[in-house]
Amino acid sequence: MNLIGKKVRHSSYGQGTVTAFYPANNTIRLVFENQPERPYDILADFDSGLLESDEQAIHETIAYIKSLPSYRLSSKALGERKTKDKDLSAFLTDCQQLLEELGIKIGVIESVGVENRLDRWGVCKSLGNGRFRILISQILLQDEAPDWMVYQTLLHELLHAAEACCGHGHNKKWKQLAAIINRKCGYDISAKDRWFDYLLLDAVGSWPHFKR
Ligand SMILES: [Zn+2]
């Protein structure tokens, strides 16, 4: 359970650690360094501004989770939903422009498609000879989903198609380039878990494309 052990900051109590998560009532238990004997259970909705961390990402994430019907959409329900609210090609152009600015050379992207599944945000498939196909989860393209989710996933997957790291997963070169993109764009596209990813597991699946 990747949420456990994550460090968060409380405006009054300072540095704390998540010691438990109760998905049934969306509550996390925090133990603060200055009061280790007294754990606090708080709602993991963060609307109260209790937690200071990656505020923007967390607020958007929680708002998005709340917008999902019962937090769980079946793949079937997604398949029946006809609309694709966001224009994926516009996001792709933005991302390719950013990579070009940074001098990161990408292989040939044969296609970027949408997939109806809930176990990953996206994937980049090698087709051989420096050609790639990228798939993005449809749930990220719904209007209610914050844009950073699409940008972050696309940049992560495009980096798998970078000439410097193609076919080698999240290798050293991939991580170096990811760090450059993170600095430039302000997202976190690295393969490691962010603490709120656990909250999104049921709704979107594993970031970025792992099985846990
Ligand atoms: Zn990856």
Image (cartoon, helix red, strand yellow):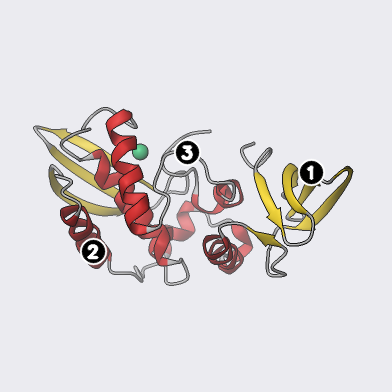
Quarter containing ligand 1? top left
Q: Nearer the viewer, residue 106 or 66?
A: 106
Rendered residue at 37%/50% (across/down): 182
**Is 118 situated left or right of 160 in this image?**
right
Please name the residue that numbered disc 3 is placed on.
192
* Amino acid identity at mark 2: Asp
The answer, for residue 137, to whether it is visible in the render is no
**Is 39 situated left or right of 134 in this image?**
right
- Percent across and percent down for residue 201 are 56, 47
Please name the residue that numbered disc 2 is placed on.
94
Q: Is residue 124 above or below residue 61?
A: above
The verdict on label 2 being within 8 Å of ligand 1 is no
Label 2 neighbour load within 10 Å: few <14, some 14-19, many 20+: some
Q: Nearer the viewer, residue 158 or 87?
A: 158
Do residues under tags 2 and 3 come within 8 Å of each other at their CB atoms? no
Please name the residue that numbered disc 1 is placed on.
33
Sequence-wise, which precedes: disc 1 or disc 3?
A: 1
Displayed quadrant of residue 101? bottom left
